[in-house]
Image (tube, rainbow, N blue to C red):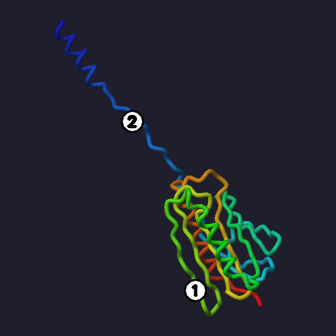
Amino acid sequence: MRNLFIFFFILILTGCKEETLPKPKAYLSLVYPKKTYEKLTIQRPYTFHILKNTNVIDETNNWLKIKYPSLKASIDITYRPVKNNLKELLTEAEKLVFKHAVKAEQIIPKDFVNPEKRVFGSLYEITGNAASHLQFHVTDSTKNFIKGSLYFYAKPNYDSILPAVNYIKEDILHLVETLEWKK
């Protein structure tokens, strides 16, 4: 009887041992609607196509805010006329990009050149927990200059918002590809 008791005691101690490991944090799996674009209807010295399910906020000085309500994000567009100050505008735009270098893991530039439409610029992809993950600027180099920045209305956690960043990046690329300057 004593041996049977010891046997069950050892069996219970060794057999019922279950390792508990901390569970990894999970992120939501987001499903995005199919994209359809429309031409910007607000009068500006420029025009481009925007995603239909965004809200465009008209701001002063030919600036815009393109809001993505379901993603809690916006693309802030600033416009400045070029008045013999292109170098200053480019320097200012790049300073704003590299201001995020403190939190950024990497800053990846991509250049745009479309001589037919006179659209020249750069897109900067900022990886890591920076405040803005995409910034861009475009110009015709003589009269017009646009700078845009993507912002999320949440604490930056790059891994969790990366799908949304990639979703909006397509819209920014489409914006630049369809950009036209008005005469």
- Seen as rendered, the residue at the extreme bottom is 116
Q: Is residue 139 left or right of residue 14?
A: right
The residue positioned farthest toward the right in the image shown: 60
Residue 48 percent location from the top left of the image: 69, 80
Residue at 67% over, 55% down: 153
What distance separates the C-alpha of mark 2 from that of mark 1?
Answer: 52 Å
- Please tell me which residue is depicted at 67% across the width and 86% down the height of the picture: 141
* 3 to the left or right of 143: left
Count of numbered circles in the view: 2
Q: Earlier in the sequence, mark 2 or mark 1?
A: 2
Q: Indicate which disc residue 92 carries.
A: none
Q: Quadrant of residue 131?
A: bottom right
Residue 113: image tag: 1
- Identify the residue position indicated by label 2 in the image: 21
Residue 102 lies, with reference to residue 7, above or below; the image says below
- Residue 101 vertical placement versus 15 (above, below): below
Which image quadrant for residue 178?
bottom right
Crowding at dot 2, Cα within 10 Å, few <14 / some 14-19 / many 20+, comes out as few
Amino acid type, label 2: Leu
SS at mark 2?
A: loop
Of 92 and 76, the residue lying toward us: 92
